[in-house]
Image (spheres, rainbow, N blue to C red):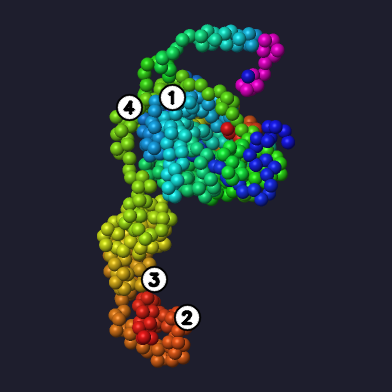
């Protein structure tokens, strides 16, 4: 899992997090034991749906101000380190 | 051969095996909204880099997405026109690390998409199943600089977030296409539908319509699917066909030589006409999908869906049918082409205005490829009527049509301004009789049955009249004189 998340962990950290994950899994097991027969699935914690916004253009950010926050910018764009492979 | 490779359809098959190509397409289309899917920045192609950006499309901390109503409406239009069921849906985070998405995830729909279980009918009548058509946001654009422009070499990348957050509909078809040609028909038909319902401009060359194709092969008659490869970077209908043909050939050769296909994502290279391995294919669990906590479920009311359904325009399939009924002798390809060019309304109006359908369709297909300009259906109808009555030759009609497209007006006036006046039959007879006496040898050979000489006499008439005469009338006259 650490490899998937691109995290570098020490052995000590791995031990500690594995313990914490086990606790989480135990909790999931408790939830799984509940009888949910006949209950509709919950899509969201709040009982509301369809919060929509009209398709009207609003303000955009100032490019120079945004790029001034970036570590490196070039030609009005964000400059980032070389990327291995292509986008998924 | 190990037990698990025995299961691979076609592995080690003899060279003369007959194969079947299986294609399933995923089409992404940018929706024609004014603003992005979750924020109010403009959704517009081009523009200076990073000028259509806001806190949401940059994924700034604390920013929250709010769903665009128009994008939902357009998605429902697409779903309905693809015969899908519109259902309650939720959004999901698709997690991955890549700088084209600054928040390190893309908001998409996963296990509960808005549209499911539809179909699309190809002009051939074949129905291709649509698994789903869901909403998601587009990513930013990255350009690799230095290191020869190749992504695996050193250098760096520049990122433009103008496209990040632009609404997309992803239409996932079942692997029911069986050839490169069928795949092209599918994309053409899908694009016509998207354009007809106003959901997208469907421009492959600007990237507003993008196609990923899943290709596998199997020996003809085997039901099991082979291992598929997904091909990216297919930017035109032509490359779609070429890529599928190349890829199926590659897989067949590999299987015949005894090597199983590895499930991969491959990149189509237009220049060398090949596909190249990009990476082994990600599985869904690599993306760690989970429900997007910042967005509420979407549950369009039955009334809203019905309202959208009522407002749908006539779809290409039904338009083809109407035109085919009005022009029953015209071949199906030409009917489809007229609809694809949105000239079916003009053709129908001209036909119902009295124009013979074949002549109308000839002009629509052959002479109006660059658009109809100022041409009205009425003048197209009277132009073909003039042709039919022998007042204009086919060549003259084509020239008159060009004038009508350019500046409108009536075909009578345009013909006059071009100096096209029909020859009366007396004038033509005198001319033909003159030619017969000038060329007695040719005439006697023609009388003996050498029909090739028709061309000689027609040519002479055309030369003398500078193309004013009707070739058909000359032929008829010659045959009448021969007796």
- Is residue B371 visible in this depiction of the protein? yes
Q: CA distance from mark 2 to mark 1?
A: 73 Å
- The image shows residue B38 at horizontal and vertical percentages of 43, 28
The numbered mark at residue B452 is: 2
- The image shows residue B33 at horizontal and vertical percentages of 39, 36
The numbered mark at residue B257 is: none
Q: Secondary structure at mark 2?
A: loop
Which secondary structure class fits the magenta region best? Answer: loop
Share a chain, discs 1 and 3?
A: yes
- Tag in front: 4 or 3: 4
Q: CA distance from mark 1 to mark 4?
A: 15 Å
- The image shows residue B7 at horizontal and vertical percentages of 65, 35
Look at the image and give the residue range highlighted in magenta: A2-15
- In primary-sequence order, the first of circles 4 and 2 is 4
CB within 8 Å, label 1 to label 3: no
Judge whether B311 appears above or below A13 on screen. below
Q: Which residue occupies 57% across, 39% down? A: B223
- Tag in front: 3 or 2: 2
Callout 3: chain: B
Q: Secondary structure at mark 3?
A: helix
Q: CA distance from mark 4 to mark 2?
A: 72 Å
């Amino acid at each position: 899992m650490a490899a998937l998340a691109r995290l570098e962990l020490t052995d000590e950290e791995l031990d500690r997090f594995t313990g914490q994950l086990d606790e989480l899994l135990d909790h999931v097991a408790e939830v799984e034991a509940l009888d949910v027969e006949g209950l509709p699935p919950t899509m969201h914690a709040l009982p509301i749906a369809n919060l929509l916004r009209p398709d009207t253009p609003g303000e955009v950010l100032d490019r120079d101000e945004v790029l001034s926050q970036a570590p490196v910018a070039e030609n009005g764009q964000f400059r980032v380190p070389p990327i291995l492979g292509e986008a998924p | 051969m190990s037990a698990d490779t025995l299961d691979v359809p076609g592995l080690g098959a003899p060279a003369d095996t007959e194969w079947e190509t299986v294609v399933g397409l995923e089409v992404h289309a940018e929706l024609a909204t004014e603003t992005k899917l979750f924020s109010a920045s403009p959704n517009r192609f081009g523009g200076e880099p990073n000028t259509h950006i806001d806190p949401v499309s940059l994924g700034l901390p604390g920013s929250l997405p709010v769903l665009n109503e128009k994008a939902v409406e357009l998605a429902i239009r697409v779903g309905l026109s693809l015969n899908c069921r519109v259902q309650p849906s939720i959004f999901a985070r698709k997690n991955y690390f890549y700088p084209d998405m600054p928040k390190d995830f893309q908001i998409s729909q996963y296990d509960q998409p808005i549209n499911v279980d539809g179909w699309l009918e190809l002009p051939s009548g074949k129905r291709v199943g649509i698994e789903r058509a869901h909403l998601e946001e587009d990513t930013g654009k990255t350009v690799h600089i230095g290191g020869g422009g190749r992504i695996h070499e050193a250098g760096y990348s520049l990122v433009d977030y103008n496209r990040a957050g632009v609404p997309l509909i992803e239409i996932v078809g079942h692997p029911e296409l069986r050839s490169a040609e069928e795949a092209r028909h599918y994309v053409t038909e899908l694009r016509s539908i998207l354009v007809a319902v106003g959901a997208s401009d469907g421009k492959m060359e600007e990237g507003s319509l993008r196609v990923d194709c899943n290709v596998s092969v199997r020996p003809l008659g085997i039901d099991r699917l082979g291992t598929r490869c997904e091909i990216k970077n297919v930017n035109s209908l032509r490359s779609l066909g070429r890529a599928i043909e190349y890829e199926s050939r590659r897989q067949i050769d590999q299987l015949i030589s005894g090597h199983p296909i590895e499930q991969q994502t491959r990149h189509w290279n237009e220049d060398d006409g090949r596909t190249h391995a990009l990476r082994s294919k990600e599985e869904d669990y690599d993306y760690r999908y989970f429900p997007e906590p910042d967005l509420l479920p979407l549950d369009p009311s039955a009334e809203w869906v019905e309202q959208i359904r009522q407002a749908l325009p006539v779809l290409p399939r039904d338009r083809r049918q109407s035109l085919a009924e009005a022009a029953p002798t015209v071949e199906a390809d030409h009917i489809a082409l007229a609809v694809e060019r949105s000239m079916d309304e003009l053709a129908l109006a001209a036909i119902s205005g009295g124009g013979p359908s074949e002549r109308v369709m000839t002009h629509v297909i052959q002479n109006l490829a660059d658009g109809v300009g100022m041409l009205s259906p009425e003048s197209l109808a009277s132009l073909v009527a003039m042709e039919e009555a022998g007042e204009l030759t086919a060549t003259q009609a084509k020239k008159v049509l060009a004038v009508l497209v350019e500046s409108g007006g009536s075909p009578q006036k345009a013909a006059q301004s071009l100096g096209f006046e029909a020859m009366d039959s007396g004038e033509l007879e005198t001319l033909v009789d003159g030619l017969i006496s000038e060329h007695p040898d040719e005439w006697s050979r023609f009388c003996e049955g050498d029909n090739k000489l028709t061309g000689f006499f027609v040519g002479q008439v055309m030369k003398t009249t500078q193309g004013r005469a009707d070739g058909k009338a000359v032929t008829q006259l010659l045959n009448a004189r021969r007796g």
